[in-house]
Amino acid sequence: MTATTTDEGFVVFDHVQKSYDGETLVVKDLNLSIAKGEFLTMLGPSGSGKTTCLMMLAGFETATNGRILLDGTNINELPPHKRGIGMVFQNYALFPHMTVAENLSFPLEVRGMGKSEREAKVMRALDMVQMGKFAHRRPAQMSGGQQQRVALARALVFDPALVLMDEPLGALDKQLREHMQFEIKHLHDSLGLTVVYVTHDQGEALTMSDRVAVFNDGRIQQLAPPDELYERPKNSFVAQFIGENNKLPGIVEELDGEKCLVRLATGEIIDATPVNIRHKGQETLVSIRPERVEFKPEMMPPGAHMIDAEVLEVIYMGDIFRTRMKVAGSTDFVMKSRNTIGQTKLHPGQHVKIGWHPADARALDPM
Amino acid sequence: MKKLLIVTTALVGVSAAAQAQELNVVSWGGAYTVSQVEAYHKPFTAQTGIKINSIDADNPAAPVKAQSEAGNVSIDLADVELSDAIKMCDEGLLEPIDPATLPAAPDGTPATEDFVPGAIQDCAVANIVWATVIAYDKTKVGDTPPTTVADFFDTKKYPGKRGLLKAAKRTLELALYADGVPADQIYEVLGTPEGVDRALKKLDTIKSDIVWWEAGAQPPQLLADGEVVMTNGYNGRFFAAEVGEGKPFGTVWDGSYMDYDLWVIPKDAPHKEDAKKFLAFSTDTQRLADQAKWISYGPARKSSNALVGLYQDGKTEMAPYMPTNPDNMKSPIWTDPTFWADHDTELNEKFNAWLAG
Amino acid sequence: MTDATTDLATGPITTNDGRPLKEALAASLAVRRRRAFLLVAPLFLFILISFIIPIGQMLGKSIYNDGFSSHAPALAAWFDAHPAGSAIDESAYVALRDDLVAMKKDKTAGEAGTRINYDISGTRSLFTAAARGAEKMQPPYMDAFLKLDKKWGDPNVWRAMRSASSPFTMDFYLAANDLKRNEDGKIVSVGEGQAVYKKLMLRTLVLSLEITAICLLIGFPIAHLLATLPMRKAMLLMIFVLLPFWTSLLVRTTAWMVLLQQQGVLNDLMVWLGIIGDDGRVQMIYNQMGTIIAMTHILLPFTILPLYSVMKTIPPSYVRAARSLGATSWTAFRRVYVPQTLPGVGAGGLLVFILAMGYYITPALVGGADGQMISNLIAFHMQKSLNWSLAAALAAQLLAVVLIFFWIYDRLVGIDKMKLG
């Protein structure tokens, strides 16, 4: 999938720009098409424009230029309450003066729904998130996780076609967060929801999404499914932002279609796959995932280049060994190797030869 | 606020007691206090070296009573109305004063005969006679300015707002006088429930046109602002506005309400002997005459009248402005302190009830 | 410490060196407690001396007045010996004469008379006059007194003296409620022409509620604006809100006088604009309207600040959530925003109400006749009539009314929900 504009998506951003002060653009020419039933995550550091995009979609901000379409209709001028979009807020935004049931009943009430129907729907939504027993509690009497579930139920109780989530799990502890990720994903699948999810947590983005849009500097840097994003980042920003990464700066020595050779600062030559470099002699940043680095020659493809490395530190992490080494002058090169039976144990001070499959070393822009 | 008063006065008392050669004198403020400072305080300090702290109060009797109740008196002298002087004396709050200690007149007449009747009380000596009179704005009353209290109540003849003191005392008397009760029978009438009703009924006729005032500085201000065309007030204040500031005011002397201002010394005053010295000094013939140079209140000694000359501007003859001038004293209502000591509570309640109604 | 060798199994737990644990703990905490006490002691002392004791003394005056009892020991003894309803015989007049002679000597007849005069108007001079002649009186004293003044035979006077012969009295609370005792000692109304306190208390309540309501109506949008504007603009607006705080109360009140009086700025402006004719100038001051306008202005910051501090803590996400759930902006405001500002509304409202109930200078200056409040009468009795006992009774009642409203507020809203900023 590419970022070309089409009016066919369920949600479409068409050349959307946003400025608050008339001097700088917070969102620069955003084009994005989201399919019905898709789980799309907007990922990026704070200030990258992702939340602004979500707010424009929800109707709390207006696009300075461009169109936003929902199910084929331009919703630029539509006030938030007429958009029918469910939204889960960062701090849940449960109304503190209402009970859980009243909170859930609120969207149904303003839609003029009858009492009995309302009650049935509220109970169904609460049961859906296993919060049926808490109907008469107030938000302040519940834990963060419980509030999160209620907020979710409230966003879903009026059967919205689109659900927006603004860092909904940010305030939860790690274990609970992982559990809720699973539950949200499960709800998405079982209800066939279209979800636009904003987060700055890349782990969350990778585990939950159908597609992830990585935002930086008001632009989408890459829009791709999680695996593609992780394995084939299109530029240095994405490579760095998603997962752990080793960076080796150098000059393109040879460029030949699917392969290239890069000369590092210390003179070694390594194999790499060209991604966004154009010509020989160009500066580049080669990115290699730590788990793709090998130090046993038999594991490397024939003809692959190998370079010297000095082991600085070996950290035992249970499932893996994390080895920090000095490579081509840089001292923060990391290798991860699985803790298998018969795994060779390295020691600080040891000198080894390391290498990788050329496809795993991606020659990117030098930033 | 009143609670604080006790404490603050207590604190003032402590600090004042620590210093010798000082007198704390409480008076009414404004032009009146200025006249006392010029005529009494300055010469007294020059002569004796005793410093005088002049303190202002809405009614100096209130802090005297407050301090006596709190058992911590810092006031050495206070300038009070006749009814308050008698009341506090009856209640044992004041130091008795021996008339023999007061200086005789220059011609040798003893003080007891030189002072006007009623000016020397058991615990108080008068320094001035003052009047509550009606003043009007000359520019707003046409060619025939008002001359009687009846004119004050005649809003047809003289349309416009009236200023009146918000208190039963003086207001009820004025109403009865306007309703035709002779000045010397007013308290007799006011002593009966029918008399009170009669007074209030008379006030009813102009109730909606009345702007009430409380502090002595207000009436000249109301008149100058054009808020009222006529108001009652203290004659000295109107004098200060008319002569001192050149305001176009005129005075109605008819039905003027006469009262004394008297010096009293609290029983527990910290500097009693100096206070007595000051009292004798300030009520001698010359001092009382000097005060009239600064404000148009009549001296309480007959012998002072001859010495009253020109206002401090050096050209205004004081006599026409004095409440003690026979031309102005044709129908004075003399205050009856006993009546007010007896009926204060009841009449003020009735007055306040009428006011709020 | 009497027995350190008690049986360990049943006795109190002890420390290693054998002291009872409780005692050791108390000793170790005592130092800390003493230190904490020393820290607050100056403030405590200050409040005690400058606040609690004077107010207590003052309120005590509402039920304690020894103006008569302390100067009439013989009469007090006679009243003790002769229960109410006994005939007033010669022995009573002997006691009266004895007391009056002493009063004359001590110059206390006025004080005693003043106390009886609070009960029966016009009796003060009865005492001062009788005290002057008491020494020369010849027995039988009953005839002598009746010859002096017939009022000495009036059972009501004797009833008042009996009641005043004890320094503790509820008479001032009766007076504060427009009640009095008749000749039989029964409690009756003082009569329409004299009843003023209940009416004024009611008016004070109504005016205070009106002012509170207006303050909330005006203050709410301003506080909302303050809480939502960008920092710089909010600070500027805040300065305007706080400006009145930095000006003396008297200056502000006089400024309103200049603005509102009939020849004042506002009337001039309206005449100039042709809204009213020169002879149709509006009376906006020296009446209730003046009191309401000036007090609303003066008290407005007291509503705005608590409201602002509450609104500042309401995240915009609540209203956004409501909007996203399908509520119009009005519904979101009414059902989600306003309920959350209630602690501020309560705090601001209560604060203004309590302040308004006791307001004194402003109504005195701009209130005219019908803009007066109960505090003005309290001031009157403090400063002019010098009837402090009645002033204290009125003040105590005012305090009680405020406390009742405080209690109602606590029951309805909960005092713990109040937020003052």
Image (spheres, rainbow, N blue to C red):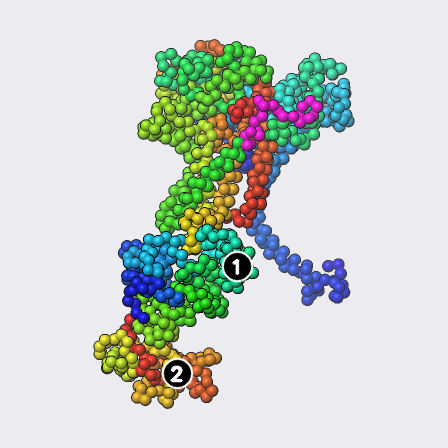
Find residue C92 and report its horizontal and vertical position in percent.
75, 21
| Dot 1 alpha-carbon crowd within 10 angstroms: few under 14, some 14 to 19, many 20 or more | many
Would you say the residues marked 1 and 2 are in contact, meaning their CB atoms lie under 8 Å apart?
no
Answer whether residue C183 is magenta in the image.
yes
Front-lying residue, B234 or B193: B193
Tag 1 and tag 2 share a subunit: yes
Residue C99 falls left or right of residue A220: right
Please report the residue visible at 54 percent of the width from the left and 61 percent of the height from the top: A132
Q: Tell me: C188 left or right of B283.
A: right
- Name the N-terminal-most of marks 1 and 2: 1
Numbered circle sitting on residue A311: 2
Structural distance between the alpha carbons of marks 1 and 2 = 59 Å
Q: Is residue C31 visible?
A: yes
Q: Using the image, name the chain to which the residue with label 1 belongs.
A: A
Is the residue C166 above or below the residue C98 in the image?
Answer: below
The image quarter containing residue C182 is top right
Kind of element beneath mark 1:
helix
Q: Is residue C338 magenta?
A: no
Please, is residue B269 above or below residue A257 in the view?
A: above
Q: Nearer the viewer, residue B116 or C253?
A: C253
- Give residue A151's position: percent from left, percent from top: 47, 59
Residue drawn at (35%, 48%) of the image: C233
Left or right? Give the position of C126 relative to B14.
right
Image position, residue A61 (x, y; %): 35, 55
Identify residue type, mark 2: Val
| Residue A123: assigned label | 1
Amino acid of disc 1 = Met
Residue at the image point whose x is 45% and y is 27% from the top: C286
Residue C78, image quadrant = top right
The answer to whether any part of residue C161 appears in the image is no
- Magenta region: which residues? C181-202
